[in-house]
């Protein structure tokens, strides 16, 4: 039994299913994850969901400074005691979905790295929040469901291609760093997991006039995945289908193509066409 597991056993802590608690206790695996995260002595880290602190200790040994956000109040005293030997550690009790991330990261140098073992039930909204939070990020290193990992790296036309994949690939370059079997966790979840590292881009993969328009067009495409893009645009923009089809043609796209098959470059071209026409009509 690992020292971390012994601490939890001695504390008689009961895992909260409602918080999606699945902890890692394998010390070798935790060291491997810290190494795969790419964190060095020059990096500051915002950790979400430290849990029992196993990975947190590894990060504190690797990084310049670590701030961790933990929701479960029962874990706070355990974490404070366990992390006492590390002066470069700060603990914040709160919900990563609602806490002021700028305030949480106020003692960290930016660009910073985010490391997280994300509860499955908030995976997608938390990733989208991190990507749009306004912090300057160096990378995200996340433990997620294997299915989510596949979505993050999905290509146009694949089932996983959607808003999560688009935004992840717009802001970062996601890669699968390690597959993690369900048996590595306690309690054992019903699905396998994956550790994904997402290095932020210096610039978007393609130029676009307005990101908001791009994401608006993408939302239309993914909302009605099996419909033609002309029909999807017509519904989203509340315009006649003929007008939506003309917009597609002006962008050099087939109005009959399904939105789920459009590439990032094609979505950007359609967004730019919309903005150009709005500018002429304005």
Image: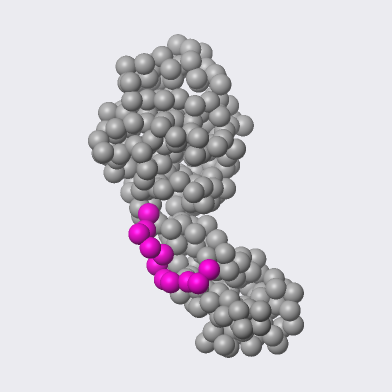
Quick one: quadrant of the C terminus? bottom right
Please name whichever residue, 41 or 173, is drawn nearer the observer in this view of the structure. Answer: 41
Residue 263: x percent and y percent?
A: 48, 73
Residue range corresponding to the magenta coloring: 200-210
Q: In the picture shown, does residue 111 fall above or below 1?
A: below
Let me know if residue 58 appears in the view: no
Q: Is residue 26 above or below residue 4?
A: below
Label the magenta part by its dominant secondary structure: loop
Chosen colour scheme:
one colour
Residue 159 sits above or below residue 43 on the image: below
Figure quadrant of residue 91: top left
Residue 184 highlighted magenta (yes or no) = no
Residue 41 lies left or right of residue 181; in this view the side is left
Q: Is 282 left or right of 33, judged from the image as shown?
A: right
Image: 114 above or below 254: above
What residue sits 43% from the left and 72% below the top? 207
Number of numbered discs: 0
Question: Most extreme residue toward the top, as rendered?
Answer: 10
Q: Position of residue 33 (x, y in %)?
A: 32, 38
Residue 149: x %, y % from top left: 44, 52
- Residue at left offset 64%, top offset 88%: 246
Name the quarter where the N terminus is drawn: top left
């Amino acid at each position: 039994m690992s020292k971390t597991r012994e601490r939890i056993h001695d504390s008689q802590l009961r895992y909260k299913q409602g918080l999606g608690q699945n902890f890692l206790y394998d010390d070798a695996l935790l060291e491997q994850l810290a190494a795969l995260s790419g964190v060095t002595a020059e990096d500051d880290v915002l950790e979400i969901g430290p849990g029992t602190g196993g990975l947190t200790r590894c990060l504190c040994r690797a990084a310049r400074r670590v701030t961790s956000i933990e929701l479960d109040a029962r874990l706070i005293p355990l974490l404070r005691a366990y992390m006492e030997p590390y002066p470069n550690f700060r603990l914040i009790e709160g919900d990563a979905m609602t806490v002021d991330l700028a305030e949480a990261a106020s003692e960290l140098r930016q660009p910073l790295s985010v490391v997280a073992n994300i509860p499955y039930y908030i995976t997608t909204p938390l990733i989208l929040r991190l990507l749009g939070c306004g912090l300057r990020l160096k990378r995200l290193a996340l433990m997620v469901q294997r299915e989510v990992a596949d979505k993050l790296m999905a290509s146009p036309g694949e089932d996983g291609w959607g808003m999560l994949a688009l935004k992840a690939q717009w802001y970062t370059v996601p890669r699968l760093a390690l597959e993690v079997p369900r048996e590595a966790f306690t309690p054992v979840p019903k699905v396998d997991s994956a550790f994904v590292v997402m290095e932020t881009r210096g610039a978007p993969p393609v130029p676009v006039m307005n990101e908001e328009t791009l994401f608006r067009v993408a939302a239309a495409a993914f909302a009605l995945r099996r419909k033609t893009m002309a029909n999807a645009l017509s519904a989203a923009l509340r315009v006649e289908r003929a007008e939506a089809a003309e917009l597609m043609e002006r962008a050099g796209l087939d109005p009959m193509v399904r939105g789920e098959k459009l590439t990032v470059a094609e979505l950007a071209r359609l967004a730019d066409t919309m903005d150009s026409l709005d500018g002429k009509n304005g």
